[in-house]
Image (tube, helix red, strand yellow):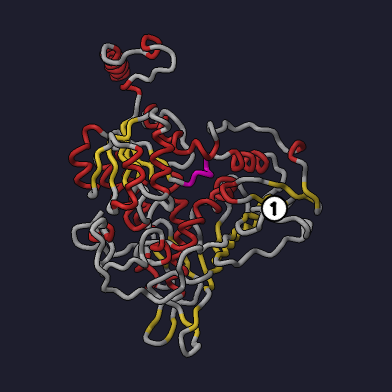
Amino acid sequence: MSNSSRRNFIKNASLAAASFYIVPRHVLGKGFTAPSDKLNIMGIGVGGKGYSDVMSSFKNGAENIVALVDVDDRQAARARKELPKATYYRDFRVALDKEGKNVDAVIVSTPDHTHATIAMEAMRRSKHVYVQKPLTHDIYEARIMAEKAREMKVVTQMGNQGASGDGVRKMIEWFNGGVIGKVHEVHVWTNRPVWPQGISYPTAGFEVPKEVDWDLWLGPAKYREYNPAFLPFKWRGWWDYGTGALGDMGCHLLDPPFKVLGIRDAIDVECSVGSVFLQDWTPEWIPEGCPPSSLVTLNYGPSERNKSNVKLHWYDGGLRAPHPEGIPSSEIIGEADGANGVILMGSKGIMTCATYGKDPKVYKDGKRVPEESLPKASLPRVKDGDGGHNYQWVEACKAGFGNMEVSSPFDYAAPFTESVLMGNLAIRSYMLKDGKNFVGRQKLNWDAANMRVTNFDAANQFVRREYRKGWTL
């Protein structure tokens, strides 16, 4: 028997054997989902965004949430109340050990610094994974996450839900139709941070609440004493745990230009950052935390989709891009209040959108182009748009690896995250100090293949962090 014939025989035999155990839907009756058709999901980090991730994937009982995991009982209370059949754990390692045989897929919605540690452990056990944005805390972690996903052949999705929206697909269709020509410059901005940032590091010495396992919350980060200034949500502005405004909003706002233009690895990056004033009115940066504002510029070479070099500018902390001459001054760009937005400057026109790729627009010759005159829909849409992002992943998990497309698989999300985190690499390098002097204010040249800055070695310490003992990847 040939190898091809043998593979077909095994496949058909497996399907035949399975048919004895899976009751077809039509036998059970219309609207009834066979237990074997449901995905068994574990949610890790189930407060805040984690709650909505779990409930979106649960979809009113269409799937099974078999386990909930959180280091903070207070944050987990709502999910536990609404999903009483799910077993509750604090330690994800214990949960995976005890529930592993019952779990098909894992949702990771913890703070940024624990994404990779948890997702890697789940993938080692052949579990499909959905990981909140940014995919990882460091560039190195993004690279190995993609490698592990390919090795284990698991279905993956990053939680930048706008990637499943219609807006991004419209922008791709319009760009493919040649409406704005080649893009040479991109501007992206956000009003974040909306959490404490650019402030002195919190003092320690607080008693850990009985509802919190502080050591587990710290995970791979260096040990520090508990302080309520870190959680919940307020961890975003501290480098040990968060990735600042870029990590929070970059994966939402930068996704449209990355998808439209097909750009991938930056050639170089530079930045300038806002400072704070100390008591003697000396301008200063707090090395443990993200600055109050930043302007980052990344350069990319031509891609297969966009035959032009691209200069991408990122603004946060209330900074905004200049209003292009090709857009009427009365027009508000991006969101209705202008707080977040995206501009793609092309050789024939300008394209803009708001967060998640919503409300895309095209301008030519100083006027807005009516949407009805732009190229029509040609790409398949995701059911329920960005609201179906979680469930797209669920359906892909049930279809099996390689059988269904998802909007933000790790093969795309990992190099995309690397590029987002390049901005933070520049910001942290900019704030480096040697004694009293700041030494890091320069453009960083990037060797993507080897994950190294080639002209300022001190910056490479931020490519891959040190992990606390017992928490290596």
For residue 168, which quarter of the picture?
A: top right
Is 71 rendered above or below residue 275?
Answer: above
- Residue 379 appears left or right of 459: right
Q: Residue at x 43, y 51 (%)?
A: 133
| Residue 2 seen anywhere in this rendered image of the structure | no
Judging from the image, what secondary structure is the residue with disc 1 in? strand
The residue lying at 43 percent from left, 58 percent from top is 448
Give the camera-side residue of 80 and 401: 80
Q: Residue at x 73, y 60 (%)?
A: 324
The foreground one among 357 and 269 is 357
Give neighbour class at mark 1: few <14, some 14-19, many 20+ (Cα, 10 Å). Answer: many
Q: Which residue is mark 1?
A: 346
User: Residue 33 at x, y = what percent?
Assistant: 38, 20
Residue 59 visible, this orientation: yes
For residue 386, above or below residue 473: above
Q: Position of residue 283 (x, y in %)?
A: 50, 84
Query: Which stretch appears magenta?
Result: 160-164
Seen in the picture, residue 472 relative to 395 is either above or below; the reply is below
Q: Residue type at mark 1: give it.
A: Gly
Residue furthest to the front: 81
Point out residue 136 in the picture as x, y percentages from the top left corner: 38, 54
Position of 98 with respect to 84 (left or right) is left
Total numbered circles = 1
Does 270 lie within the magenta span?
Answer: no
- Name the image quarter holding the N terminus: top left
Q: Is residue 162 magenta?
A: yes
Viewer-closest of 386 and 228: 228
Locate residue 218, reporting x and y percent. 27, 61
Q: Main secondary structure of the magenta part?
A: helix
